[in-house]
Amino acid sequence: MRRTICILTLLALALTTATIVVAKKPAAERPARKQGPGRHGPGGPGQMPLVPPGLVNQLELTADQQTAFDALAKQWAADRDAWLKENKPDSAQQAEMKAAREAGDRERMQALREQHQGKMKSLHEMRQSYVDKVKALLNDDQQSILARAQEHARQHRHHHHHHGGKGGKGGRPGKGAAPADTE
């Protein structure tokens, strides 16, 4: 019995020490966090797929629909990536946002956020044009599934935005929209 207690105590001590060592590592030395399929989809902001894979499965596309969808998704990814490359914030913009955040300058942060949202609007409009092309491929039942997913995502974003998700504590975004976010 004593031996078991000793072993458990040593194990607990080792785990505690390991946790402290990892926590004290500078952020640059820690493993990078993976971007999950949250608000922005796999890969982070701007990397959202045309239609989330789970929703594509729910749509039960025919072979012809799948072929057409794959072509649209590939073209969307290419156009999205080109847009992101062209509109990537430069280091001066990032430094300005960081300085405003560190200074607690909410007005400047809001102005910079609005500027960013204005730029993102064209990306959202481009994505919506692709989603509209996907809708044209679907039959009535599939369109109904897509519409329900879009409404769910819209409600989730509305609830999330109005209940502290976006720009919540410390200006950090919340966990994000439902995986069926297709808008």
Image: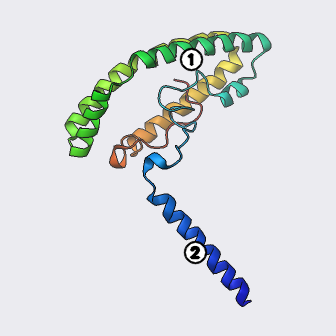
Residue 33 position (above or below residue 179):
below
Q: Amino acid at mark 2?
A: Leu
Height in image: 148 above or below 70? below
* Residue 77: numbered disc: 1
Residue 13 disc label: 2
Distance, label 1 to label 2, CA atoms, is 48 Å
Rendered image quadrant of residue 107: top left
133 relative position to 103: left or right: right
Q: Position of residue 125 (x, y in %)?
A: 45, 15
Q: Which mark is residue 1?
A: none
Residue type, mark 1 in image: Ala
Q: Can see residue 53?
A: yes
Q: Residues within 10 Å of mark 2 (few under 14, many from 20)?
A: few
Q: Residue at x 62, y 23 (%)?
A: 146
| Front residue of this view, candidates 157 and 169 | 169
Residue 158 image point, x, y percent: 44, 36
**In terms of secondary structure, where does tag 1 sit?**
helix
The x, y position of residue 133, in whole percent, is 59, 10
Residue 130 or 24: which is nearer the viewer?
Answer: 24
Q: Secondary structure at mark 2?
A: helix
Q: Give the mark, 1 or 2, whose residue is nearer the N terminus.
A: 2
Residue visible at 59% across and 31% down? 180
As drawn, the residue found furthest toward the right would be 63
Q: How are the residues colored? A: rainbow
Classify residue 145 as left or right of residue 103.
Answer: right
Label pair 1/2, CB-CB below 8 angstroms: no
Q: Quadrant of residue 87?
A: top left
Mark 1 Cα shell of 10 Å, populated few (<14), some (14-19), many (≥20): some
Residue 97, given in percent of the width and then of the height, sits at 28, 35
Identify the residue at image location x=50%, y=17%: 80
Q: Nearer the viewer, mark 1 or mark 2?
A: 2
In screen coordinates, is 170 left or right of 102? right
